Image (tube, rainbow, N blue to C red):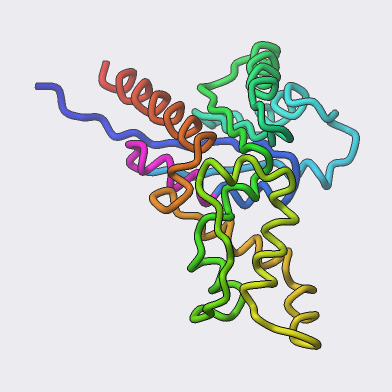
Amino acid sequence: MTAKQAVYIRFLFTGEGSFDDHLITHLRRCCVLAGADEAEGVTIPFSRLGDRIGHTVAEKLNFALVHEPNVNLVFVHRDADSVDPEPRYDEIREAIQKVTNTPAYVAVVPVQETEAWLLLDESEIRRVAEDPNGTVALDIPSARQAERISSPKEHLNAVILKASEQTGRRYRKIKQKVHQKCLLILDALDPEGPVCEVPSWKRMFSDLEAAVEEMAVRHSK
């Protein structure tokens, strides 16, 4: 019997901005949950590099893979910006075909925005809102309903503020920090939590499982 070979993943993440870069922690957990023994992720600070690279997925990947050649998986993140994610999947697929020596890749396409994945964990929302034992109704959406909200970023901000149950000066203080609180929810996003029922997340994770399984097969040969 052939001994099982360990699968180590070092992945490159390309997203649309610094907020999305915080998905790296979540995706590392996803890799291990999908069967990898260890995983680490890297990204390139595209926002600090200005227009020297270009803005298309292919341009970003070509640049990033020159500077991070020792990765064996690429996560390409693009918000769907609509209820139909297929144009984004097509865009990513076409971009990958234009990139030289691309390793395995997984498309990360939240519908409509990344924040839709953060709307479901009521306890986490109450925690970052600094009122973990709050009782005000938050109207947390179902996994499918979350993807039908046209502006999940604004919706998440509003839910956090409502969960704080504050008024006046304290409310304004929470409002000033609401972006940082969204980051805290993203950093803590549990791949075995409510997000695992969101269709776009399930598609991403299924593709990741297939990629990890293919790596395991190659390593065993």
Q: Position of residue 159 (x, y in %)?
A: 65, 65
215 or 33, nearer to the observer: 33
Q: Which residue extends farthest left?
A: 1
Q: Position of residue 164 (x, y in %)?
A: 64, 78
Q: Main secondary structure of the magenta part?
A: helix
Q: Which residues are magenta?
A: 25-37
Query: Relative to 38, is 63 above or below?
Result: above
Query: Relative to 10, is 194 above or below?
Result: below
Q: Position of residue 198 (x, y in %)?
A: 50, 41
Q: Position of residue 35 (x, y in %)?
A: 32, 36
102 left or right, relative to 91? left
**Residue in view at x 58 percent, y 54 percent:** 118
**Residue in view at x 45 percent, y 54 percent:** 190
Q: Quadrant of residue 155?
A: bottom right
**Residue in view at x 88 percent, y 33 percent:** 52
Quadrant of the image for the N terminus? top left
Q: Which residue extends farthest bottom?
A: 169
Q: Quadrant of residue 174?
A: bottom right
Q: Within the magenta stretch, is there residue 104?
A: no
**Residue in view at x 64 percent, y 27 percent:** 85
Query: Relative to 185, is 86 above or below?
Result: above
99 or 66, nearer to the observer: 99
How many badges with numbers are in the image?
Answer: 0
Q: Within the magenta stretch, is there residue 31?
A: yes
Query: Relative to 20, is 106 above or below?
Result: above
145 or 5, nearer to the observer: 145
Quadrant of the image for the C terminus? top left
58 left or right, relative to 205? right
